[in-house]
Each structure stands twice: as C-alpha cells, then as structure tokens.
C-alpha cells in the first residue's frame, strides 16, 4: 500500500472495489482523533469537556470502541479491513482489543508522514540525542547498570546504586525500564508496597521479540525483492493470528524489511540486507531448554526464510553470506526486558493508551519520586512514543522538584 491518504484510498478502491466511502470516512475520523489529541496536549491533558463535545464529537463517540468495532460501524468491506489492519503488529494487540483511537492515530501519522529511517539506522538517533544531551551539559554513563534504588520507605527514595558500587544520592528517579524490574528487583524491599506490586502484576506483557538479520551477496533487484516492507501473516484475522503467536511452533508471522529499497547505499553494490521480526504472545520461548537453545533459534530462522521465499517467490537462501538471530533471550539479556518483551505492557482493554494518559496523575501518586519513561510507560512503545514519555516524565519531575523548593 502506498503512502499518502489519497493514494492509499485509490489503491484500496482498486483492490477492493466499493471501499472508497468507508476508507474516506476512516481517514476523516483519524484526522479528528489527531486534532483532539493535539488539543489535549496543548492544554496538558486538562481538556474542557464542552469544547471536546463541540469540536471532536466523533472522537468521543469512537472513544471506547475497538478497531474492529469502528471499522464494522463504518461499513468497511472485510477485504479492506484485512489490508488496513495489517499494521496491527506495530502495536502488538489484536484488533478486537486494540483501541480505535490508538490505532487510528498511529495509522494516520504513518500514512501521511511516511516511514522514515535514519541512514545509519536507529542507532544514529541515539547518537544524535547523546551529542545534544552532552552539549546541554548533561551526562551519560555507559556500562553503569543500576543495581539498587535505595529508599527509606514507600515514596522516600534516597539514592541509586550502580554495579561498581557508586552511590548517587537523589530523591527522584525516572526509570526507563519495566516497573516489573523496579518493583521486583531494583527498589529496596522495604519501600515496595502491595499496591505497586498488584498494579504491575495486573498488566500483560506484550510480544517477546525474535529477529533475524541477513547479509545477502546479491542485490535486492537480482533477488526480486521489490518492496521495502513486507507483512506476512498466517491469517488476516488478527484475533486468530494473535492466538497462533502464543506458541513458537504455530507462529509464522513476520515483518520483514529490505533496507536497500529505502536506502540503496546501505550495503556494498551487488549485495543487500534483509531483516525479519516476529513476536511470541506468551512465554513459550521460556520452555526452550539450554541444550536446545541454538537449534531452536535455527528452527525459527529457517522457518522465516522458508515463509518469505514461499510468499514472495524470491529465492534468498543461496545468497546468504551473513546471518545473525536475536531471540527473546537476547532481548532480555541486552535490554533487561523481562521474558525478552519488546513492546512493554500491552496497550489493550483497561490498560489502553487513553486510560494510561488519564491515569498519569494517579499512577505517579503510587510512589512519589518515581516515574517511568520509555516503552513501558504511559505512551507505550515505538521511538516517538518512548521519547514523548521521557519528555513528559522529565517535565513532571522538574515540576515535583519545584514544588519541593517552594
Ligand atoms: C526489531 C525491532 C524493530 C523496531 N522497529 C521500530 C520502528 O521501526 N519504529 C519505531 O518507532 N519503533 C520500533 N521498535 C520499537 C522501539 O525500538 C522501542 O519502542 C524503543 O526502543 C523503546 O525504547 P526504550 O528506551 O523504552 O527501551 P530500550 O530501547 O529497550 O532501552 C532500555 C534501556 O534500558 C537499559 N537498562 C535496563 N535495565 C537497566 C538498569 N538496571 N540500569 C541501567 N540501564 C538499564 C537497557 O540496557 C536499554 O539500553 C522496534 C523494536 C524492535 C525490537
């Protein structure tokens, strides 16, 4: 599907005749969602309900419904819904449970702003942030994992301890890791309350990641790889697909990217790069034994290549020069995420995006002095969301500090 609202609607009409009216209504509704969110941000979430009712009535009407409920109400043909819903794996929740507001706001941004990729991959963003942080007088300490958050009791943080024993006195922490990690290991036990543990345990881990990276010794063109991004599913029904993703053996989903088709110079001439990602919607990977670990990784990698060749007709196996796989164990090891989760907590049902935003103040009161940022926080996963949550928690912490000084 192409980028740009009109191009998207035209293409959909071509492949699903009769879809134009509902697709147009869908994008109009998404525009309203985006405008409502922009208004909400401009007033720091303190929205005026009569203004909301007057200017964003459809946003309010769609507010508590799932993606599938809203698309059904718009009368969208099933085939068009199947194509439109293909992006569900970006948010990792099936469309019966995913809030329409969340999906709609993501899809409209994606379709109207295009997909963007830094030439030196996402690491380039980290490097740019690092440069700016240092320019502004900030500090970054690498190889310095936090092993303890010291506290006199609930809501009374006194400092943070690093693995080399360094102690940083502070009353405020913004944690860019999971609440499970903080309440289950980092925070001193006497400060952990039952309420915090229950609040964390009530939430559902999202997908555990598995990625495969291939360096191929032929060009994308020679191999017949024409697209930049492929979504390959067992079924277009996201609810059934989600269910199949609970088990390693029944999951054949892949979101696959050929970077050369966005940035031809990313690998030497006559070669290309292909990477695949999938998710497991339970801790089934935890059942892999130590002895079977490498074989299990090979099985999933082999299956990804088989499915890609079957669905696209591109024969890539004979062109593989470099191969590396990252399992949930790899993600757990390098990022510290429990079970190798790559999308934080599932933004679904009572824990959806809007509920999280509305609960921000109350959640922060669970433990004064402690806030969260990143994929596990109120804006959920994705780079832009992770940055926005850091910005929010940073500002709120500055607000907390100012109140202390008064
Ligand atoms: C394969 C893949 C492809 C993706 N593609 C996209 C994409 O195209 N677009 C997009 O928007 N998003 C994408 N995402 C999602 C995006 O990467 C995440 O949403 C984002 O990185 C979340 O940022 P974060 O800071 O919360 O977590 P992370 O980036 O995982 O960072 C957490 C950091 O905390 C550190 N840490 C953990 N514990 C401690 C501790 N005790 N002390 C000190 N440090 C600690 C870890 O080492 C890690 O560096 C993708 C994710 C994956 C896995």
Image (spheres, rainbow, N blue to C red):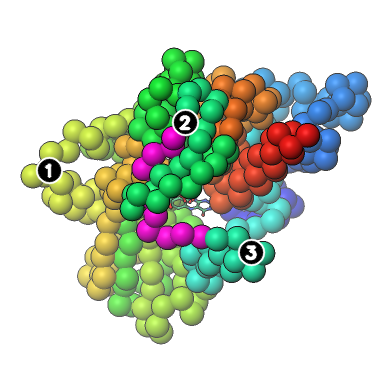
Near mark 3 (Cα within 10 A), the count class, few <14, some 14-19 or many ≥20, is: few
Which residues fall within the magenta stretch?
Answer: 140-151
Above-or-below relation of 238 to 219: above
Q: Residues within 10 Å of mark 1 (few under 14, many from 20)?
A: few
Q: CA distance from mark 1 to mark 2?
A: 37 Å
Density class for disc 2 (Cα within 10 Å; few <14, some 14-19, many ≥20) is: many
Element type at mark 3: loop
Q: What residue does disc 3 label?
A: 137
How far from the left and from the top, in percent, is residue 107? 64, 44
Of the numbered discs 1 and 3, the one sitting upstream in the chain is 3
Let me know if residue 156 is in the magenta part: no
In the foreground, 350 or 396: 396
> Element type at marker 1?
loop
Q: Residue furthest bottom?
A: 269
Q: Is residue 45 above or below residue 219?
A: above
Q: Earlier in the sequence, mark 1 or mark 2?
A: 2
- Which residue does the numbered mark 2 point to in the structure image? 151
Q: Earlier in the sequence, mark 2 or mark 3?
A: 3
Is 55 located above or below residue 300 in the figure?
A: above
Residue 104 rendering spot, x and y as whole percentages: 66, 37
Whether residue 176 can be seen here: no
Q: Which mark is residue 388?
A: none
Q: Position of residue 14 (x, y in %)?
A: 64, 49
Q: Is residue 303 left or right of residue 240?
A: left
Q: Which residue corresponds to mark 1?
A: 290
* Label 2: element kind: strand
């Amino acid at each position: 599907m192409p980028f740009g609202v009109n191009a998207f609607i035209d293409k959909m009409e071509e492949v699903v005749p009769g879809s134009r009216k509902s697709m147009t209504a869908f994008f109009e509704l998404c525009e309203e969602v985006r405008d409502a969110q922009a208004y909400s941000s401009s007033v720091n979430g303190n929205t005026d309900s009569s203004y909301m009712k007057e200017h964003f009535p459809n946003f309010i009407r769609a507010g508590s419904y799932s993606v599938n409920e809203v698309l059904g109400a718009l009368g969208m043909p099933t085939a068009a819904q199947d194509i439109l819903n293909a992006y569900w794996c970006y948010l990792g929740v099936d469309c019966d449970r995913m809030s329409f507001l969340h999906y709609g706001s993501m899809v409209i941004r994606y379709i109207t702003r295009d997909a963007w990729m830094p030439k030196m991959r996402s690491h380039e963003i980290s490097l740019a942030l690092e440069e700016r942080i240092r320019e502004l007088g900030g500090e970054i300490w690498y190889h310095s994992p936090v092993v303890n958050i010291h506290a006199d009791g609930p809501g009374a943080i006194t400092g943070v301890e690093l693995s080399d024993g360094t102690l940083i006195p502070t009353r405020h922490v913004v944690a860019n890791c999971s609440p499970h990690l903080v309440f289950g290991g980092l925070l001193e036990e006497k400060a952990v309350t039952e309420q915090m543990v229950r609040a964390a345990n009530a939430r559902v881990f999202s997908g555990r990641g598995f990625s495969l990276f291939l360096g191929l010794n032929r060009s994308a063109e020679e191999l017949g790889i024409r697209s930049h991004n492929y979504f390959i599913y067992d079924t277009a029904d996201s609810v059934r697909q989600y269910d199949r993703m609970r088990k390693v053996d029944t999951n054949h989903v892949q979101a696959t990217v050929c970077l050369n088709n966005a940035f031809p110079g990313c690998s030497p001439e006559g070669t290309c790069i292909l990477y695949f990602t999938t998710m497991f919607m339970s801790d089934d990977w935890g059942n892999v034994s130590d002895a079977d670990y490498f074989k299990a990784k090979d099985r999933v990698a082999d299956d990804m290549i088989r499915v890609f060749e079957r669905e696209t007709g591109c024969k890539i196996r004979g062109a593989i020069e470099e191969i590396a796989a990252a399992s949930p164990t790899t993600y757990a090891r390098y990022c510290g995420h429990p079970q190798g989760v790559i999308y934080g907590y599932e933004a679904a049902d009572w824990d959806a995006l809007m509920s999280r935003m509305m609960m921000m103040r109350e959640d922060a009161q669970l433990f004064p002095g402690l806030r969260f940022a990143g994929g596990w926080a109120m804006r959920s996963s994705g780079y832009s969301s992770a940055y926005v949550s850091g910005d929010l928690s940073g500002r709120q912490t500055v607000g907390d500090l100012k109140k202390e000084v008064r």
